[in-house]
Image (cartoon, rainbow, N blue to C red):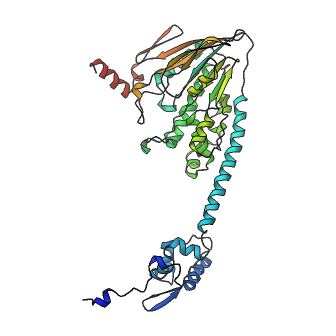
Amino acid sequence: MATENERHQKPDIPSLGSQHTTDSVKVRDIEYTRNDCIEDISRLAEVFPGRRITRDFYRENSNIPEKAWTGLFGTFPEFLRAADLEHTRYAAKVRTQVAKHAAHDKLKEVSEQRREYGNRYLREKRGRWKTLVGCSDLHDKECDPFYLRVLFETIKTVDPDVVCIDGDLFDLPEFSRHPKDPREWDTVGRIQAGNAIVGNIREAAPEAQIDLIEGNHEARLVKHMMDASPALRSLLGDLHGFDIIKLLKLDEHEVNYVADADLHAFTDAQLRREMVKNYRMYWNCLLAHHFPVGKEKGVPGFNGHHHRHIVWTENNARFGSYEWHQLGAGHVRDAVYCDGTKWNNGFVIANVDTQTESVAFDYTYVGDTFAVSGGTWYYREPHEFYPALEKELDFRRNGG
Protein backbone atom coordinates (compact mmCIF):
# COMPACT_ATOMS: atom_id res chain seq x y z
CA MET A 1 0.00 0.00 0.00
CA ALA A 2 1.39 3.41 -1.01
CA THR A 3 2.61 5.68 1.74
CA GLU A 4 1.37 9.23 2.13
CA ASN A 5 4.62 10.54 0.58
CA GLU A 6 4.34 8.19 -2.42
CA ARG A 7 0.77 9.27 -3.10
CA HIS A 8 1.85 12.90 -3.29
CA GLN A 9 5.12 12.31 -5.15
CA LYS A 10 5.35 14.30 -8.41
CA PRO A 11 5.49 12.19 -11.57
CA ASP A 12 8.40 12.37 -13.99
CA ILE A 13 6.15 13.73 -16.75
CA PRO A 14 5.34 17.41 -16.36
CA SER A 15 1.81 18.72 -16.66
CA LEU A 16 0.59 20.07 -19.99
CA GLY A 17 0.69 23.50 -18.50
CA SER A 18 4.49 23.33 -18.22
CA GLN A 19 5.17 21.64 -21.56
CA HIS A 20 6.40 24.82 -23.24
CA THR A 21 9.08 25.52 -20.62
CA THR A 22 10.32 21.93 -20.10
CA ASP A 23 13.44 20.93 -22.04
CA SER A 24 13.67 17.34 -20.82
CA VAL A 25 11.63 14.60 -19.21
CA LYS A 26 12.57 11.33 -17.50
CA VAL A 27 10.80 8.10 -18.40
CA ARG A 28 11.90 4.82 -16.70
CA ASP A 29 15.07 6.51 -15.42
CA ILE A 30 16.04 7.63 -18.92
CA GLU A 31 16.11 11.33 -19.62
CA TYR A 32 14.85 12.56 -23.01
CA THR A 33 15.31 16.10 -24.29
CA ARG A 34 13.31 18.03 -26.85
CA ASN A 35 16.24 17.71 -29.26
CA ASP A 36 16.27 13.92 -28.80
CA CYS A 37 12.63 13.75 -29.84
CA ILE A 38 13.03 16.15 -32.75
CA GLU A 39 16.09 14.29 -34.09
CA ASP A 40 14.25 10.97 -33.84
CA ILE A 41 11.14 12.06 -35.73
CA SER A 42 13.28 13.95 -38.28
CA ARG A 43 15.28 10.74 -38.87
CA LEU A 44 12.04 8.92 -39.57
CA ALA A 45 10.98 11.60 -42.05
CA GLU A 46 14.30 11.19 -43.92
CA VAL A 47 14.01 7.39 -44.02
CA PHE A 48 10.45 7.61 -45.39
CA PRO A 49 10.52 10.63 -47.72
CA GLY A 50 7.13 11.73 -49.00
CA ARG A 51 5.26 9.78 -46.33
CA ARG A 52 3.10 11.62 -43.85
CA ILE A 53 4.26 10.84 -40.34
CA THR A 54 1.16 10.00 -38.35
CA ARG A 55 0.91 9.34 -34.63
CA ASP A 56 0.37 5.60 -35.12
CA PHE A 57 3.23 5.36 -37.61
CA TYR A 58 5.58 7.12 -35.19
CA ARG A 59 4.53 4.83 -32.35
CA GLU A 60 5.49 1.78 -34.40
CA ASN A 61 8.81 3.09 -35.68
CA SER A 62 10.21 5.50 -33.09
CA ASN A 63 12.95 5.10 -30.48
CA ILE A 64 11.22 7.56 -28.14
CA PRO A 65 8.46 6.43 -25.75
CA GLU A 66 5.16 8.22 -26.12
CA LYS A 67 5.23 9.50 -22.57
CA ALA A 68 8.43 11.39 -23.37
CA TRP A 69 7.24 13.38 -26.38
CA THR A 70 3.79 13.84 -24.84
CA GLY A 71 5.36 15.32 -21.75
CA LEU A 72 7.54 17.65 -23.80
CA PHE A 73 5.13 18.73 -26.54
CA GLY A 74 1.67 17.86 -25.26
CA THR A 75 0.11 16.87 -28.58
CA PHE A 76 1.42 15.14 -31.69
CA PRO A 77 0.63 18.11 -33.99
CA GLU A 78 2.72 20.33 -31.68
CA PHE A 79 5.51 17.74 -31.88
CA LEU A 80 5.37 17.83 -35.67
CA ARG A 81 5.41 21.62 -35.70
CA ALA A 82 8.47 21.70 -33.44
CA ALA A 83 10.27 19.43 -35.93
CA ASP A 84 9.16 21.59 -38.89
CA LEU A 85 7.17 18.69 -40.27
CA GLU A 86 3.88 20.56 -40.12
CA HIS A 87 2.95 24.17 -40.62
CA THR A 88 2.70 26.39 -37.58
CA ARG A 89 -0.79 27.49 -36.64
CA TYR A 90 -0.16 30.88 -38.18
CA ALA A 91 1.28 29.39 -41.37
CA ALA A 92 -1.64 26.95 -41.59
CA LYS A 93 -4.08 29.83 -41.16
CA VAL A 94 -2.33 31.82 -43.89
CA ARG A 95 -2.30 28.78 -46.17
CA THR A 96 -6.03 28.29 -45.60
CA GLN A 97 -6.72 31.94 -46.39
CA VAL A 98 -4.60 31.76 -49.56
CA ALA A 99 -6.46 28.64 -50.68
CA LYS A 100 -9.81 30.28 -49.92
CA HIS A 101 -8.99 33.35 -51.95
CA ALA A 102 -7.51 31.27 -54.80
CA ALA A 103 -10.74 29.23 -54.91
CA HIS A 104 -12.80 32.40 -55.01
CA ASP A 105 -10.60 33.77 -57.80
CA LYS A 106 -11.44 30.62 -59.75
CA LEU A 107 -15.14 31.11 -58.98
CA LYS A 108 -14.90 34.68 -60.22
CA GLU A 109 -13.36 33.45 -63.46
CA VAL A 110 -16.11 30.84 -63.87
CA SER A 111 -18.76 33.46 -63.08
CA GLU A 112 -17.46 35.64 -65.91
CA GLN A 113 -17.50 32.69 -68.30
CA ARG A 114 -21.06 31.74 -67.34
CA ARG A 115 -22.38 35.13 -68.41
CA GLU A 116 -21.55 34.13 -71.98
CA TYR A 117 -23.72 31.01 -71.75
CA GLY A 118 -26.94 33.03 -71.76
CA ASN A 119 -26.66 34.17 -75.37
CA ARG A 120 -25.18 31.19 -77.18
CA TYR A 121 -28.41 30.07 -78.85
CA LEU A 122 -30.66 33.07 -79.31
CA ARG A 123 -33.40 32.48 -81.89
CA GLU A 124 -35.13 35.76 -82.49
CA LYS A 125 -37.99 35.46 -84.99
CA ARG A 126 -39.52 38.40 -86.79
CA GLY A 127 -43.11 39.32 -86.17
CA ARG A 128 -45.26 41.30 -83.81
CA TRP A 129 -46.84 38.44 -81.84
CA LYS A 130 -44.78 36.26 -79.53
CA THR A 131 -45.50 33.31 -77.28
CA LEU A 132 -43.49 31.98 -74.34
CA VAL A 133 -44.05 28.89 -72.21
CA GLY A 134 -42.62 29.29 -68.71
CA CYS A 135 -42.13 26.57 -66.09
CA SER A 136 -40.17 26.38 -62.87
CA ASP A 137 -38.96 24.06 -60.10
CA LEU A 138 -39.13 20.77 -61.96
CA HIS A 139 -36.51 19.19 -59.66
CA ASP A 140 -35.19 16.50 -62.01
CA LYS A 141 -36.44 12.99 -61.20
CA GLU A 142 -38.84 14.37 -58.58
CA CYS A 143 -40.95 15.91 -61.36
CA ASP A 144 -44.59 14.84 -61.57
CA PRO A 145 -44.94 12.58 -64.67
CA PHE A 146 -48.44 13.92 -65.37
CA TYR A 147 -47.11 17.48 -65.23
CA LEU A 148 -44.39 16.60 -67.73
CA ARG A 149 -46.86 15.02 -70.15
CA VAL A 150 -49.12 18.08 -70.06
CA LEU A 151 -46.14 20.42 -70.41
CA PHE A 152 -44.59 18.59 -73.37
CA GLU A 153 -47.87 18.27 -75.26
CA THR A 154 -48.73 21.92 -74.61
CA ILE A 155 -45.37 22.99 -76.02
CA LYS A 156 -46.01 20.92 -79.14
CA THR A 157 -49.44 22.49 -79.57
CA VAL A 158 -48.47 26.09 -78.81
CA ASP A 159 -45.19 26.03 -80.79
CA PRO A 160 -43.75 28.91 -78.68
CA ASP A 161 -40.98 31.27 -79.65
CA VAL A 162 -39.34 30.66 -76.26
CA VAL A 163 -39.46 27.99 -73.58
CA CYS A 164 -38.16 29.38 -70.30
CA ILE A 165 -37.19 26.98 -67.50
CA ASP A 166 -37.26 29.48 -64.67
CA GLY A 167 -34.76 27.87 -62.31
CA ASP A 168 -34.39 24.69 -60.24
CA LEU A 169 -34.57 22.23 -63.07
CA PHE A 170 -32.50 20.14 -60.68
CA ASP A 171 -33.03 19.17 -57.05
CA LEU A 172 -29.64 17.72 -56.01
CA PRO A 173 -30.20 17.24 -52.26
CA GLU A 174 -26.56 16.13 -52.00
CA PHE A 175 -25.60 19.81 -51.86
CA SER A 176 -28.60 21.13 -49.94
CA ARG A 177 -28.70 22.65 -46.45
CA HIS A 178 -31.98 20.74 -45.95
CA PRO A 179 -31.59 17.30 -44.29
CA LYS A 180 -32.24 14.31 -46.50
CA ASP A 181 -31.45 10.62 -46.22
CA PRO A 182 -28.02 10.08 -47.90
CA ARG A 183 -29.28 6.74 -49.18
CA GLU A 184 -31.50 8.72 -51.56
CA TRP A 185 -28.54 10.59 -53.09
CA ASP A 186 -28.18 10.02 -56.81
CA THR A 187 -26.27 12.92 -58.33
CA VAL A 188 -25.65 11.36 -61.73
CA GLY A 189 -29.20 10.00 -62.00
CA ARG A 190 -30.68 13.38 -61.13
CA ILE A 191 -28.56 15.27 -63.63
CA GLN A 192 -29.46 12.75 -66.31
CA ALA A 193 -33.16 13.14 -65.43
CA GLY A 194 -32.87 16.92 -65.79
CA ASN A 195 -31.08 16.53 -69.09
CA ALA A 196 -33.83 14.19 -70.31
CA ILE A 197 -36.47 16.82 -69.51
CA VAL A 198 -34.61 19.42 -71.57
CA GLY A 199 -34.15 16.88 -74.36
CA ASN A 200 -37.92 16.29 -74.48
CA ILE A 201 -38.57 20.04 -74.54
CA ARG A 202 -36.17 20.41 -77.45
CA GLU A 203 -37.93 17.55 -79.25
CA ALA A 204 -41.31 19.19 -78.64
CA ALA A 205 -40.08 22.61 -79.82
CA PRO A 206 -37.22 22.10 -82.31
CA GLU A 207 -37.24 25.74 -83.46
CA ALA A 208 -37.80 27.45 -80.11
CA GLN A 209 -35.26 29.31 -78.02
CA ILE A 210 -34.76 27.42 -74.76
CA ASP A 211 -33.51 29.33 -71.73
CA LEU A 212 -32.55 27.84 -68.37
CA ILE A 213 -32.38 30.56 -65.73
CA GLU A 214 -30.03 29.59 -62.95
CA GLY A 215 -31.90 28.95 -59.70
CA ASN A 216 -30.45 28.37 -56.27
CA HIS A 217 -30.22 24.61 -56.88
CA GLU A 218 -28.15 25.03 -60.05
CA ALA A 219 -25.96 27.64 -58.37
CA ARG A 220 -25.04 25.36 -55.50
CA LEU A 221 -24.14 22.59 -57.97
CA VAL A 222 -21.79 24.89 -59.88
CA LYS A 223 -20.28 26.21 -56.66
CA HIS A 224 -19.66 22.68 -55.41
CA MET A 225 -18.04 21.78 -58.72
CA MET A 226 -15.67 24.71 -58.49
CA ASP A 227 -14.78 23.82 -54.90
CA ALA A 228 -12.93 20.94 -56.56
CA SER A 229 -14.34 18.15 -54.43
CA PRO A 230 -12.48 14.94 -55.42
CA ALA A 231 -15.48 12.83 -54.41
CA LEU A 232 -17.79 14.85 -56.62
CA ARG A 233 -15.39 14.67 -59.56
CA SER A 234 -15.28 10.91 -59.24
CA LEU A 235 -19.05 10.74 -58.96
CA LEU A 236 -19.57 12.78 -62.13
CA GLY A 237 -16.71 11.22 -64.07
CA ASP A 238 -18.85 8.99 -66.28
CA LEU A 239 -20.59 12.06 -67.72
CA HIS A 240 -17.39 12.68 -69.71
CA GLY A 241 -16.79 16.25 -68.81
CA PHE A 242 -16.54 18.42 -65.76
CA ASP A 243 -17.83 21.78 -66.86
CA ILE A 244 -21.32 23.18 -66.78
CA ILE A 245 -21.77 23.12 -70.58
CA LYS A 246 -21.09 19.40 -70.87
CA LEU A 247 -22.66 18.50 -67.56
CA LEU A 248 -26.02 20.09 -68.42
CA LYS A 249 -25.70 19.31 -72.15
CA LEU A 250 -26.25 22.95 -73.07
CA ASP A 251 -24.64 22.54 -76.49
CA GLU A 252 -26.34 19.24 -77.26
CA HIS A 253 -29.82 20.70 -76.71
CA GLU A 254 -28.88 24.28 -77.70
CA VAL A 255 -29.87 25.80 -74.37
CA ASN A 256 -29.01 29.27 -73.06
CA TYR A 257 -27.88 29.18 -69.43
CA VAL A 258 -28.82 32.54 -67.90
CA ALA A 259 -26.51 33.20 -64.96
CA ASP A 260 -25.31 36.65 -63.92
CA ALA A 261 -24.74 35.86 -60.23
CA ASP A 262 -21.14 36.18 -59.08
CA LEU A 263 -20.39 32.87 -57.35
CA HIS A 264 -17.20 34.09 -55.71
CA ALA A 265 -19.28 35.69 -52.95
CA PHE A 266 -17.71 34.67 -49.66
CA THR A 267 -20.82 34.10 -47.54
CA ASP A 268 -24.24 32.49 -48.07
CA ALA A 269 -25.87 35.88 -47.52
CA GLN A 270 -23.70 37.43 -50.25
CA LEU A 271 -24.53 34.55 -52.59
CA ARG A 272 -28.27 35.03 -52.00
CA ARG A 273 -27.90 38.70 -52.90
CA GLU A 274 -26.03 37.72 -56.06
CA MET A 275 -28.73 35.22 -57.08
CA VAL A 276 -31.28 38.00 -57.67
CA LYS A 277 -29.23 39.01 -60.73
CA ASN A 278 -30.35 35.86 -62.56
CA TYR A 279 -33.26 36.89 -64.75
CA ARG A 280 -34.14 37.52 -68.40
CA MET A 281 -36.20 40.22 -70.08
CA TYR A 282 -38.15 39.23 -73.20
CA TRP A 283 -39.28 41.67 -75.89
CA ASN A 284 -38.75 44.57 -73.50
CA CYS A 285 -41.99 43.80 -71.64
CA LEU A 286 -41.88 40.31 -70.07
CA LEU A 287 -39.57 39.40 -67.18
CA ALA A 288 -38.66 35.90 -65.99
CA HIS A 289 -37.03 35.77 -62.56
CA HIS A 290 -36.56 32.79 -60.28
CA PHE A 291 -37.36 34.82 -57.17
CA PRO A 292 -40.44 36.95 -56.38
CA VAL A 293 -38.18 40.00 -55.96
CA GLY A 294 -38.48 40.28 -59.75
CA LYS A 295 -41.99 41.68 -59.23
CA GLU A 296 -40.40 44.85 -57.87
CA LYS A 297 -39.00 45.74 -61.29
CA GLY A 298 -42.41 46.98 -62.45
CA VAL A 299 -42.71 44.74 -65.53
CA PRO A 300 -45.21 41.97 -66.37
CA GLY A 301 -43.64 38.62 -65.61
CA PHE A 302 -43.33 35.53 -63.48
CA ASN A 303 -41.17 33.82 -60.87
CA GLY A 304 -40.79 30.37 -59.36
CA HIS A 305 -39.01 29.15 -56.23
CA HIS A 306 -41.97 28.94 -53.82
CA HIS A 307 -44.00 26.21 -55.60
CA ARG A 308 -47.32 28.01 -55.09
CA HIS A 309 -49.31 29.88 -57.72
CA ILE A 310 -50.07 33.48 -56.76
CA VAL A 311 -51.18 36.32 -59.05
CA TRP A 312 -50.57 39.98 -58.32
CA THR A 313 -52.31 42.74 -60.27
CA GLU A 314 -50.02 45.74 -60.60
CA ASN A 315 -50.27 49.14 -62.28
CA ASN A 316 -47.83 51.72 -63.49
CA ALA A 317 -47.61 54.48 -66.07
CA ARG A 318 -45.76 52.40 -68.62
CA PHE A 319 -47.83 49.20 -68.71
CA GLY A 320 -51.09 50.28 -67.13
CA SER A 321 -52.70 47.32 -65.36
CA TYR A 322 -50.67 44.13 -65.67
CA GLU A 323 -50.06 40.79 -63.92
CA TRP A 324 -47.18 39.12 -62.14
CA HIS A 325 -47.43 35.35 -61.65
CA GLN A 326 -45.67 33.18 -59.12
CA LEU A 327 -45.68 29.75 -60.73
CA GLY A 328 -46.57 26.43 -59.21
CA ALA A 329 -43.91 23.75 -59.37
CA GLY A 330 -43.42 20.68 -61.51
CA HIS A 331 -42.12 18.79 -58.46
CA VAL A 332 -44.35 16.12 -56.89
CA ARG A 333 -45.93 17.43 -53.71
CA ASP A 334 -43.76 15.24 -51.52
CA ALA A 335 -40.59 16.42 -49.79
CA VAL A 336 -38.85 15.67 -46.50
CA TYR A 337 -37.92 19.29 -45.80
CA CYS A 338 -41.30 21.07 -46.04
CA ASP A 339 -45.04 20.47 -46.28
CA GLY A 340 -45.60 19.59 -49.91
CA THR A 341 -49.38 19.51 -49.49
CA LYS A 342 -49.26 23.32 -49.58
CA TRP A 343 -47.69 23.32 -53.04
CA ASN A 344 -49.46 23.26 -56.35
CA ASN A 345 -48.36 22.48 -59.86
CA GLY A 346 -48.59 24.53 -63.03
CA PHE A 347 -46.91 26.51 -65.77
CA VAL A 348 -47.71 29.61 -67.79
CA ILE A 349 -48.24 30.57 -71.42
CA ALA A 350 -47.43 34.24 -72.01
CA ASN A 351 -48.72 35.84 -75.22
CA VAL A 352 -47.08 39.14 -76.16
CA ASP A 353 -47.90 42.00 -78.50
CA THR A 354 -44.43 43.48 -78.99
CA GLN A 355 -45.82 46.60 -80.66
CA THR A 356 -47.92 47.71 -77.67
CA GLU A 357 -45.81 45.79 -75.11
CA SER A 358 -48.91 44.05 -73.79
CA VAL A 359 -48.79 40.62 -72.15
CA ALA A 360 -51.69 38.20 -71.71
CA PHE A 361 -51.07 35.26 -69.37
CA ASP A 362 -52.74 31.87 -69.74
CA TYR A 363 -51.95 29.85 -66.63
CA THR A 364 -52.24 26.04 -66.73
CA TYR A 365 -53.07 24.51 -63.38
CA VAL A 366 -51.98 20.86 -63.28
CA GLY A 367 -54.33 19.26 -60.79
CA ASP A 368 -54.58 16.02 -58.89
CA THR A 369 -56.62 14.21 -61.54
CA PHE A 370 -56.83 16.51 -64.57
CA ALA A 371 -55.53 19.63 -66.28
CA VAL A 372 -56.83 21.90 -69.04
CA SER A 373 -54.27 23.57 -71.25
CA GLY A 374 -55.14 25.55 -74.36
CA GLY A 375 -58.65 24.12 -74.30
CA THR A 376 -57.38 20.52 -74.28
CA TRP A 377 -58.32 18.28 -71.37
CA TYR A 378 -55.74 15.93 -69.87
CA TYR A 379 -56.47 13.17 -67.36
CA ARG A 380 -53.98 11.64 -64.96
CA GLU A 381 -53.33 8.03 -65.90
CA PRO A 382 -53.01 5.29 -63.25
CA HIS A 383 -49.21 5.09 -63.50
CA GLU A 384 -48.97 8.88 -63.01
CA PHE A 385 -50.30 8.78 -59.45
CA TYR A 386 -47.62 8.68 -56.76
CA PRO A 387 -47.89 7.52 -53.13
CA ALA A 388 -48.05 10.95 -51.46
CA LEU A 389 -50.80 12.09 -53.84
CA GLU A 390 -52.82 8.90 -53.38
CA LYS A 391 -52.53 9.31 -49.62
CA GLU A 392 -53.68 12.92 -49.84
CA LEU A 393 -56.66 12.01 -52.06
CA ASP A 394 -57.71 9.19 -49.70
CA PHE A 395 -57.49 11.60 -46.78
CA ARG A 396 -59.77 14.10 -48.52
CA ARG A 397 -62.24 11.43 -49.66
CA ASN A 398 -62.58 10.26 -46.09
CA GLY A 399 -63.46 13.74 -44.91
CA GLY A 400 -60.03 14.64 -43.54
Classify residue 394 as left or right of residue 154.
left
In the rendered image, the quadrant that contains the N terminus is: bottom left
Q: Nearer the viewer, residue 54 or 21?
A: 21
* Residue 359 visible in the shown view: no
- Against 162, is 377 above or below? above
Q: Residue at x 70, y 11 (%)?
A: 354
Q: Position of residue 253 (x, y in %)?
A: 65, 28
Q: Position of residue 299 (x, y in %)?
A: 64, 18
- Vertical order, 190 against 332 (above or below): below
Q: Is residue 86 above or below residue 177?
A: below
Q: Where is residue 122, by image quadrant?
A: top right
Q: Give how far across and how far down residue 80 sits, in percent.
A: 56, 73
Residue 56 seen from this side: yes
Residue beneath the point at 60% across and 43% down: 223
* For residue 54, above or below residue 211: below
User: Which residue appears farthest toward the top when viewing the image?
Assistant: 375
Task: Write down the quadrant of residue 361 in the picture.
Answer: top right
The quarter of the rendered structure image containing the C terminus is top left
